[in-house]
Image (cartoon, rainbow, N blue to C red):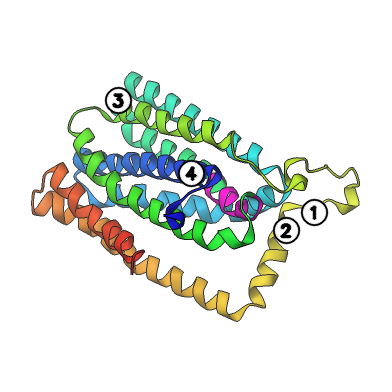
Amino acid sequence: MNKIKLSAQTIRLLIIKFTAGFGSGMLSFATGLYILHRTGSALGMGVSLITGPIISLLLTPFVGFVVDTFNHRKVMIAAQITTSLGLLLFGFTFQLWPAQYFAELIGLIVILQITDNFLSTTLTASLVQLFDSDELQKVNSLNQSVSSLASFLAPIIGALVYTLISIDNFAFIEIGFELIALFTIMFLRFKNAIQEQKPQSTDASSTETVWQNFRAGFQYLRNQRLMRILIISSAAINFFFSAVNVGEPYFLVKTLKLSSTQYGITDSSLALGCFLEEFY
């Protein structure tokens, strides 16, 4: 029984990962399906799917700099508040100008991608300050399992909800998940006092700029052959897998005429495989 006991700190982390992942997954599923139904074009859905990765690439130097420089708790709280405000703005904007849905959805995707990058990167970087070294392996395993579970449930539940409510109400529901994550973040206990009360240097010469921070990280990768191979391989796999991400929804919805619920169940199969993999 001791093997399944979870500390309060671990439970808080899992709540953050599940609520943020599940809510974002539902909204992402609904957004893609809505664009596909409205435009009937794989290109339109492809634009919505490629927007996130492009934003992530452009943000890479800034996210690393912010996470290395500023208080982690404050960064996560700011990300959650910005996410909630962005969702609120989208919901009301969509109600006022529904004909401009594509531009509004792309704008929402940009905002969510920015805040999700800051949240996920900061949370991952904070693990060593949230848990002892002997807990990290167990926490990482549970973390991945919860993320896979959220990815599995999101399309199924998202498809069911999609048939009942409009896309703007989807955004309002997502705000509830983001607020739960925000509330839980406030109760995380950082064990590293330096991170919680990080003094700001007043010496301008000792202050590292964004690009200096980025170059230092890039230089580190240049000296790590294994990491270079992993990054290049992952990039290649994701590049070719994007054909599946765009082609599969179009084929299932437009060609095979699957309902939203049927498509949601099909889309969950990959996440189910990842979730089951955690137990083998």
What percent of the width, then of the height, locates residue 229?
52, 78
Instruction: Give the CA separation, mark 3 to mark 4.
Output: 40 Å
Q: Which residues are magenta?
A: 119-129
Q: Which residue is mark 4?
A: 11
Q: Is residue 145 above or below residue 31?
A: below
Q: Secondary structure at mark 1?
A: loop
Which is more foreground, mark 1 or mark 4?
4
| Coordinates of residue 230 in the picture (x, y in percent) | 50, 74
Can the viewer see residue 43? Answer: yes
Badge 3 amino acid: Pro
Residue 120 located within the stretch drawn in magenta: yes
Which is more N-terminal, label 4 or label 1? 4
Cβ atoms under marks 3 and 4 closer than 8 Å: no
User: Does 159 sit above or below residue 180?
Assistant: below
> In terms of sequence position, does the residue under pointer 1 or pointer 2 come before the other?
1
Q: Earlier in the sequence, mark 3 or mark 2?
A: 3
